[in-house]
Image: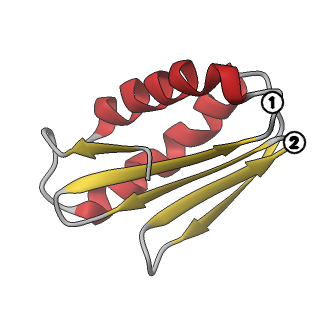
Amino acid sequence: MDIKVPYSQITDKKQGYEQAKKLIPEVIQKFGVTAQVKNDDAATTLSAKGSGFEAKIEFRESEAVVSVDLGFLLKPFKGKILETIEKQIKKVV
């Protein structure tokens, strides 16, 4: 786990998950990378895997938990990447 984003606009994890499903492809495109996004509706979890990175967003009862695993070349950008993801998630939760 890298960051936790508490819910401020929603009260239900399913609501946040559904909105994030629409938002995540935009965030990935913003970084200019290609990634395969998998949605797990039962677990309210989104995961994205691309060249040199893997990210997971789990929607819990009161917060979204973000984990990002970066390859060697992307590690210096981890702070900026997490900051961008956090901003985008805060828009929907």
Helix, strand or loop status at disc 1? loop
The first of marks 2 and 1 along the sequence is: 1
Residue 65 in the image: x percent, y percent? Answer: 37, 53
Residue 12 in the image: x percent, y percent? Answer: 18, 61
Q: Residue furthest right?
A: 51
Q: Residue at x 48, y 74 (%)?
A: 41
For the residue marked with disc 2, what is the amino acid?
Ser
Seen in the picture, residue 28 relative to 80 is either above or below; the reply is: below
Callout 2–callout 1 Cβ contact below 8 Å: yes
Q: Residue at x 39, y 47 (%)?
A: 19
Residue 69 in the image: x percent, y percent? Answer: 65, 47
Residue at image mark 2: 51
Residue at image mark 1: 33
Q: Is residue 19 left or right of residue 50?
A: left
For the residue marked with disc 1, what is the amino acid?
Val
Q: Is residue 31 left or right of residue 91?
A: right
Q: Nearer the viewer, residue 16 or 55?
A: 55
Cα–Cα span, label 2 and label 1: 8 Å
What is the tally of numbered marks visible in this picture?
2
Q: Is residue 84 left or right of residue 70?
A: left
